[in-house]
């Protein structure tokens, strides 16, 4: 790291390389933080978490008791040990509380004044954060397993919600009209919401080649229920997970299965599984609930990097905080745990610039300024 800092200062290297290296180091050093607690409010399992993308400061949680909680993640006490306090709770006594399990909560991508929630009570609610009152309530005939608002849409404010057996849904972070859905029938479909004629494509785990084992497996993404999907931050790839205990990485443009082998991925959930992907690292990492632990995978190689252990029961969801490379997870044990990068080792006093690796100056970063005194 000292070498990267010196190279950046001297114009030897791209400044973005230092940022990627430090973000990657922080993700690889994630550990359960004993000095940071998240106030325990939920009386039953936590199904969903979301951190607002504007400041990265406020986090929502939704539980199987129908309760929604908003937390402030900032350390206002400035002390080494602190608790992330709940700012408000939509509790059982609230007149507009969800009657059954909350499956998804999400902040409005551009403003912390609005958030959304959907539930097994067959409703999707749009909340005013300031008044803690629903601005609108949508009633459906079937169970709402998941919903999602596009993070990049500028020409629409559609919320994608699916009923009955569609368990996971996500807008592309690259194209505002493209939507991916995962179903209990094992299929993953890509949609252009401007087209009424049907889906753009159905992802095929065999890339067009017929399955030798079963013809029924053709044109399916998984041999079980697809209950989790997540785009990479650049939108170029889509990661899916199914109850066949497999995770697959897809080229989102061509729909091709990249055939990355992640091995057996424990997934016993009968409903949606919320996992996360890092942002700004090299390589990128996926954080996947794995029983009572969280498995960390290298997205493009499939390597299992580590297992984060700390929960007492099944982990249902996790969310990545890209500003500080932190991870938060929610479990059936009613706890939300904070996973924070380990502190950096202190630099020895005898390190000097002479001991750092010498490199040739990159011409792109040469100082082109010259003094008039040097000119002839």
Image (cartoon, rainbow, N blue to C red):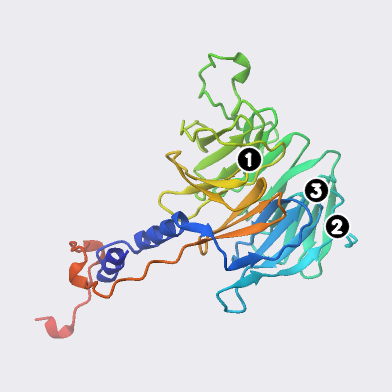
**Quadrant of the image occupied by residue 73:** bottom right
- Counting residues from the N terminus, which is met first, the one under dot 1 or under dot 2? 2
- Observer-nearest residue: 142 or 175? 142
On the image, numbered disc 2 is attached to which residue? 97
The crowd level at tag 2 (other Cα within 10 Å; few <14, some 14-19, many 20+) is: some
Question: Among all residues in the image, which is located at the extreme front?
Answer: 312
* Whether residue 293 is visible: yes
In the picture shown, does residue 273 fall above or below 94? above
On the image, numbered disc 3 is attached to which residue? 101
Report the side of 291 relative to 42 (left or right).
left
The residues bearing labels 1 and 3 have C-alpha atoms spaced at a distance of 18 Å
Give x and y (percent) for residue 145.
Answer: 75, 42
Mark nearer the viewer, 1 or 3: 3
- Observer-nearest residue: 315 or 71? 315
On the image, numbered disc 1 is attached to which residue? 228
Q: Is mark 1 on a helix, strand or loop?
A: strand
- Counting residues from the N terminus, which is met first, the one under dot 1 or under dot 3? 3
* Whether residue 156 is visible: no
The residues bearing labels 3 and 2 have C-alpha atoms spaced at a distance of 10 Å
In the picture shown, does residue 282 fall above or below 73? above
Question: Among all residues in the image, which is located at the extreme bottom?
Answer: 373
């Amino acid at each position: 790291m000292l070498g990267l800092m010196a190279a950046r200062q001297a114009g030897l290297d791209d400044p973005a390389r230092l940022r990627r290296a430090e973000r990657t180091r922080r993700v690889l050093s994630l550990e359960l933080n004993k000095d940071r607690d998240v106030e325990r409010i939920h009386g039953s399992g936590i199904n969903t978490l979301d951190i607002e993308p504007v400041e990265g400061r406020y986090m929502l949680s939704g539980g199987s008791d129908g309760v929604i909680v908003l937390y402030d993640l900032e350390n206002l006490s400035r002390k080494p040990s602190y608790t992330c306090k709940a700012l408000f709770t939509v509790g059982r006594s609230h007149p507009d509380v969800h009657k059954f399990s909350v499956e998804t909560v999400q902040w409005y991508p551009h403003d912390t004044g609005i958030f959304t929630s959907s539930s097994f009570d067959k409703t999707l609610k749009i909340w005013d954060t300031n008044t803690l009152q629903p601005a609108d309530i949508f009633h459906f005939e079937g169970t709402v397993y998941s919903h999602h608002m596009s993070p990049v849409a500028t020409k629409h404010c559609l919320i994608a919600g699916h009923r009955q057996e569609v368990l996971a849904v996500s807008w592309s972070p690259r194209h505002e009209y493209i939507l991916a859905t995962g179903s209990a029938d094992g299929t993953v479909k890509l949609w252009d919401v401007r087209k009424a004629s049907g889906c753009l494509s159905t992802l095929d785990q065999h890339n067009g080649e017929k399955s030798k084992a079963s013809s029924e497996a053709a044109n399916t993404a998984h041999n079980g229920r697809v209950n989790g999907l997540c785009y990479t931050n650049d939108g170029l790839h889509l990661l899916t997970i199914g109850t066949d205990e497999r995770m697959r990485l897809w080229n989102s443009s061509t729909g091709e299965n990249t055939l990355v082998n992640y091995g057996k991925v424990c997934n016993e959930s009968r409903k949606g599984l919320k996992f996360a992907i890092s942002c700004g690292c090299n390589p990128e990492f996926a954080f996947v609930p794995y029983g009572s632990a969280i498995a960390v995978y290298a997205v493009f190689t499939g390597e299992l990097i580590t297992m984060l252990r700390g929960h007492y029961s099944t982990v249902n969801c996790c969310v990545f905080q890209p500003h500080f490379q932190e991870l938060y997870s929610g479990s059936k044990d009613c706890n939300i745990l904070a996973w924070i990068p380990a502190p950096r080792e202190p630099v020895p006093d005898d390190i000097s610039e002479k001991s750092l690796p010498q490199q040739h100056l990159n011409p792109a970063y040469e100082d082109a300024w010259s003094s008039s005194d040097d000119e002839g």
